[in-house]
Amino acid sequence: QDCDGLIVRSATKVTADVLEAAERLKVVGRAGTGVDNVDVEAATRKGVLVMNTPTGNSLSAAELTCGMILCLARQIPQAAASMKEGKWDRKKYMGMELNGKTLGVLGLGRIGREVATRMQAFGMKTIGYDPIITPEISATFGVEQLPLEQIWPRCAFTTVHTPLLPSTPGLLNDSTFAKCRRGVQVVNCARGGIVDEGALLRALRSGQCGGAALDVFTQEPPKDRDLVNHPNVICCPHLGASTREAQSRCGREIAMQIVDMATGKGLAGVVNGQALSKAFAPQTKPWITLARALGTVLRMVGKQAQGSVQVCTLGTPLQEAGSYLTPAVAAGMLAGGAQKEVTLVNALLLAQEAGLKVRGHLGHSVHQPGTSRLWVGVLGQGLGAKDSWWGKETTEPSEEHCGGRSPETCWVLKQAKASEPSTLPALTGELTVSLLSRLQSHLSSSMVAGEQWSIVGLSAPLSDLSELKPRVVEVFQLHL
């Protein structure tokens, strides 16, 4: 309950109840690739980052896959078991060469490409499919990309290396097995469920599938033993990452990732907020603070976090900033609400549930060369408001209306009537009392429906606003 970070391997379940009990938790680190044991949705809702180590066990998983392919080709486990039973069945275990055979690799990420390059050394022709990796990239490591419909009938061996996503369960099913070459050999060292286990068993019994090598199952350990006990199936108890090197590497990597996050050096391996990795660069932090502040200003103006919000970034330095400035604006607009803590991780989700539509937009030009601009506008519930901020490419953002300065605090003062006396005398009196703050800038809007906004830039926040409150409809202090 008192932990800020939690590191787990595959056996520990991080459920919604665990996340709710850990009130201070900021990050869950998974020492490994799969996060099936972490309730990522519940973590996101609470604003907790979920990290993994996607590269830590890649080599171990790839090597196990290659071993499985060799075992299928030469029936090594079955022959070894026969020997232990005192038998000498040379004719029973006739195998096949890998040279010249076609291997289909479904998923060409880190593990898939490592498998492909290793099996090419055995003379295998490698073809594959990946919805993200381009054919030009896969060609650099010797894999010809084809549509799935063309892959099924061409492969003597098929191995899957996709994550378990809503679109991937049952990737190999009754329909796809029917399209495969008869006797196809199937390997799954990725995630249980990508290969439909019922369809696989039916294909094995009919001879449409000649053999299968499984390191993962839909239910682990599997209760239905029909697939495990089939004579043409070789299997392991999820050993893909079970090497001393991989375990050590994953543990070291997740520890360093959390340290880097805590010290502000960087963000890597994020599962539920990949766009936030750019938010840890030193030059982006002032912009994130600013985006939160502008969100807070708009919330104060509108008195409620509802409507449609447009976050526009202009200038080359902010070309990819919308991914983290948009949730930052949403976090500012939701701050102080019913949610205990709004972070960049859960801000957009909570904003959507609150009826607030926050969208990012990249502008194409700024009227001052060498500058960047963040513009935020909200329209809804009878409210129309906007605010913007300028900054040089080489410096932190600064308010254009404040003469290029970067005040630590902005007061936003709302006057209900034009006949109300100016608040500047009262403000000057407060500054006289407070020796720590001085007036840096003052800007008033035009009168709209008898109301006027004033923005006052101060060098430091004031401790007491009581003298000003009777003179205005609303006043608040924003510390940047």
Image (cartoon, helix red, strand yellow):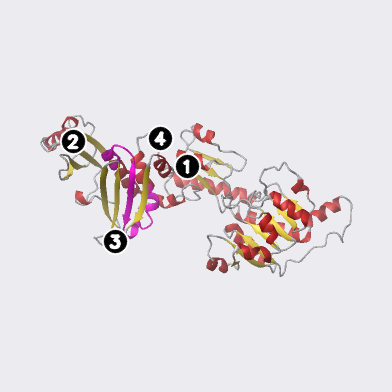
Task: Give SS at disc 1.
Answer: helix
Q: Residue 435 carries which label?
A: 2
Q: Mark 1 points at which residue?
A: 44
Task: Answer with mark 4 or mark 2, whichever residue precedes in sequence.
Answer: 4
Mark 2: which amino acid? Leu
Q: Mark 3 points at which residue?
A: 365
Labelled pair 1, 3 in contact (Cβ < 8 Å): no
The Cα–Cα distance between marks 1 and 3, rounded to whole angstroms, is 34 Å
Left or right of residue 470, residue 197 in this image: right
Task: Answer with mark 3 or mark 4, whichever residue precedes in sequence.
Answer: 4
Is 33 or 103 nearer to us in this picture?
Answer: 103
Measured from the top left, where is residue 148 in percent x and y?
61, 62
Q: Which residue is drawn at 52% across and 43% down?
A: 40
Task: Give SS at disc 4.
Answer: loop
Is 151 or 332 nearer to us in this picture?
Answer: 151
Labelled pair 2, 3 in contact (Cβ < 8 Å): no
Residue 48 appears in the picture as rendered: no
Q: Name the residue under label 4.
A: 339
Q: Does the magenta-highlighted stretch encompass residue 305?
A: yes
Please provide the residue range marked out in magenta: 298-326
Q: Residue 468 carries which label?
A: none
Task: Answer with mark 1 or mark 2, whichever residue precedes in sequence.
Answer: 1
Labelled pair 4, 2 in contact (Cβ < 8 Å): no
Within 10 Å of disc 2 (Cα), the crowding (few <14, some 14-19, many 20+) is few
The Cα–Cα distance between marks 2 and 3, rounded to whole angstroms, is 42 Å
Task: Answer with mark 1 or mark 4, whichever residue precedes in sequence.
Answer: 1
The Cα–Cα distance between marks 1 and 2, rounded to whole angstroms, is 44 Å
Mark 4: which amino acid? Gln
Locate the C terminus by quadrant: top left
